Structures are given as structure tokens and as C-alpha cells.
Image (cartoon, grey):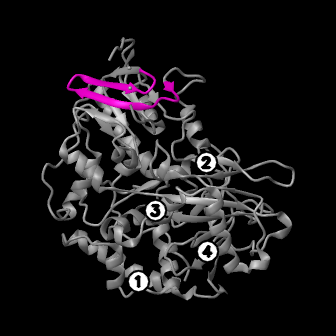
Amino acid sequence: MDCHLSVRQYIAFCDCFSPSGAAYQHVKVKLCVRLAQALSNNSVTDFLILEYNSEIGGRCRHASFGKDKNGNPYTVELGANWIQGTQSPGRPANPIWTLVSICTLRKTRLDSSIIQSQKYQVKNNFSDDASIETFDTSGPVDYTYKLKEYETAYRKVEQDAGHIISDNLHDRSLRAALRDAGWDATGDPQAEAVEYYELDTDYAQISKLSSEEFDVANENSSFHGFSEVNNLVIDPRGFNAFLHGQASEFLKPNDSRLLLNKIVTKITYDNSGVIIQNSDGTCIAADYAITTFSVGVLKSNHVKFSPALPDWKNTAIQTFEMGVYTKIFLQFPLDKVFWNTSTQFFLYASPNTGYYTEWASLDHEDFFPGSGILFVTVTTDLSLIVDKQDDKTTKQQVLIVLRQMFGKENVPEPLDFMYPRWSLTPWAYGSYSNWPPGMTLEGHQNLRANVGRVWFAGEATSAEFYGYLQGGYFSGQDTGERVAACVNGAYARCQEEIHYEKLNATSGGSDEFGPQNGWFNRSFQTTGDTADS
């Protein structure tokens, strides 16, 4: 490796990486937007951000799609799309809600006094999961009562998850917990569709692959901790406009500390610092590195670590799950819209679980009225299939389903069709993380914990908010502040994260749920607003 050194800085990692790579720049830290802001807020300005893509934003990505009546394209979100949990009166605000912004203030079934946030003025509106019509292969059929049956069972699961913590019991899958609570969707396509809508699309994986203990806590953290309100982002600049706004607070235009189109291939580390090698042959030497690679990227082994990561870290990486959540967009002729545009969601019960089950209309008065745009969501199992199919095959499949739902004679050919392929995207290899049954809090702490001067951040490392944008926010803030303390010589705060060479079968009881294991709230309490009955 032939590298030459330049200035000393820190290093900041954003979704940057890929296979193979070397000429040195010497720095102190590498990170993402919230990480960089945390460093900057703590008077650390000597850092670099390495970004795989041509702009910041990571899995918060959008694309132009279709055309309006004037021939202008719409902006649709390929990744993160909702602000999940806003703010209830008297409760803390979701930081993403605080950063994002403009929504239409109207009375909803959940909260008549939604607090309007306007920091970066990202347009969003209330997404009503109770605005739903149900279908099966024969067409419209009402099985919405099964949604209430599911919710009754899930409330029992919530209580049981609390007992797992307080009594230090073994974790199990959400599917097992739901069966124990009286809900068993097996062999009932309508019930399977309901479970898919309520659960699978939240965690991008089926219920038998999801932890009862931690997925319940995960939902409580956002929806009982902040609010049960979900808002859909519909800003023409894209959801990641708030990230660009946040970055503008500490990065100047054309800031030399932001390195775009950088594909990290190897991280070499020891007690004195780190060296980052990139696919373009460049190298960066730094005092510290903060990686925000997704779990999918870490699992892929396309980024090499030297020395190899220890067994306790590798076990955590391979155990934690990476789900795939795919939105497939269709635009139909504006004069041939065949669905009820006052309804937001449409549920399809297929003999094959998760087969083009959840549909959402963007042609709605609160989103893109008159757009003729629908999208259908598929998750991990089907996502892995459609990611390898060509557009023509997938389009034929979704049209067959739509024609079963709404009648063959009513569904024309779409004007436009598009979907991302997250499982094949080399800087993501998936959409967001999920906590599998049986992984303990200590096991997850091993995912969070630093390895010497290499620190780990990102949504997957948030014990309470994994899978959510706010998870990335809180993780970035905490890790950035810790590394800033190390840089500034504040050694009381600059302490290595605890890790566990040997894991127990359970999480060890409620005493383990504290900051030492990345747990900062009491997520098993049912607080916040609740839906009207």
C-alpha cells in the first residue's frame, strides 16, 4: 500500500463502503450528519465525512416519478417515508419531528392538537392507518373486524413483554406470543393479511423472526413515548431535505470535510489510530473512526477490518437481522383512477402470505391529489424475489393482483412504474434492522460497542429505536459526544463501551436496562396518546 499523509483530523462515516483498495490524508474522525453535528457542538471541527453516494442522506432517499397535469414529476420516497411518532401534549418530541416540519393542522382521530414543527419546513401530513378497505382474490370483502381482533391480542402481548423484562424470562418470537394471546393467522389469508399490515411491514420481517421482548419495546419507544401519530412526508425536495438543512449548520458550501463518492474498502486499526482505505486508491489516517455502515453492509464482509473484528462483535453482527422493505410505485391515467381516493390504504388477502398485500394511495387530498399514484409494499421474502426480477415481470404480477381486487375491466396499464432494489444496493444491502428472538440486550450491546478506536453508530445500534430514523439520530448524538470527549481529553466521558465475551440466555432483568447497555428510557410503560375506540 503506497499512501502519503496529509493533515491530521478525525473521521466520520456515513453510508459509505464497498468491495476492494490506496495515497493518505490524515484526519481525526469519520461520521454521518448527526454524528458530525454532535462533534461540532462539542468544539470538534477536525473531521471528515466519507459518503458512498453523490449526496448525503443514506437510506433516506427519493426519486422523481410520473408526471402531473403540467408534465412535472412527483417526488416519491424510496426509503424512509414517515415521521413515526410526532409529539403528544406533555410528552417529549420525536427529534425527527422537531427537525422536519410543515404539516396541515387538522383534527385527527388520535390527536386534535398536533404541534407543528417548522425548523426545516419539510412538508408532511397525517397518515391514517384506520383509513382502509379490504380485499381478497374475489374482490372487495370486509374483514376489518379482524384488525380489532389482532389489536386485542397485541395488547396482551404488550403486557407479557413487560413481564419478560421484570421477571427475567426467556424471549420468544412475536408469532408465539400472539398465538398465546389468542391470535393465530395460520391458514387464514385474511388474518395473515391483517398481521402483515400490523406487524410485518413495521419490522420488514415475518413475526416468527421478530423478538417479542424488544419489538414491543421498540414500538412503545416511539408510539407511546412520543405519539401514535404517523405523518407521511410529501415534500418535493425529498425527506432528506432536513438532513441537508442540518448539515448546513456546520458544513460550508463545498466544504472540504465532506468527501462524496468515497467507497470504503478496508479499516485498519490499533491503539494509536485508524487507517481508512478507499476503492479509488486514497487513504485517510485518523485518531478515531465512527462507522455507520448498515447491518447489511457489515454482514456482507465487503469492508475488511484489520485486525479482524473480535468474535463477540462478529456474532452480534451476524445475529442481528436486516430487513428489506420495498415500495413499488405505479401511476395510472388521471381519468382512469379506479380506487376510492378518500381511502389511504387497501389490504389484499392472498393465499400466499405477504404477496402484494399492502397498498397505499398517494392520490389523496392530503398527499398528491389527482396524481393517479399507488404504491404496494413488499417485505423481505418477496422483496428478495422482486429485487432479482425485471420490471416487466413484477409489473405483470402486481397488475394481476390489482385486477383481482378492483376488477379486470377497471385497471388499465400504468403510465409509469418503478421500484428500488434495496437488497442489491451495495451501500445498504437492505432497508433497516430488526431484533430477532433470543438476542439479549447484552448481545445487542456487543453490536453497539466500540472496538478500540473504531466506533459504531447508526439505527441498528439504538437499543430502543432500531429501524427508525430517530434511532440513527440518538445513536449519532451519543457516539459523537463520546468520541468528542475522547478528542477533547474529557476522559470521564471518554470510556470504552462495555462488551460481553460471554452471553447469558436472558437479558438479566430490569437492572440491565440502563445506559450501560444503550437503554435510556422506560419503553415498557404504556404512555402517550391512544386511539379512539
Q: Which residue is mark 1?
A: 153
Q: Mark 3: which secondary structure? A: helix
Q: Nearer the viewer, mark 1 or mark 3?
A: 3
Percent coordinates x, y for residue 445 in the rendering: 25, 50
Q: Residue at x 50, y 61 (%)?
A: 385
Q: Which residue is mark 4?
A: 109
Lower sequence index among marks 3 and 2: 2
Cα distance in 3D space between marks 1 and 3: 24 Å
Q: Nearer the viewer, mark 3 or mark 2?
A: 3
Percent coordinates x, y for residue 458 in the rendering: 40, 45
267 within the magenta span = yes
Lower sequence index among marks 4 and 2: 4
Q: Are the residues flagged by discs 4 and 2 in contact, CB closer than 8 Å? A: no
As drawn, 231 above or below 266: below
Q: Point out which mark residue 380 bears.
A: 3
Q: Nearer the viewer, mark 4 or mark 1?
A: 1
| Residue 222 left/right relative to 407 | left
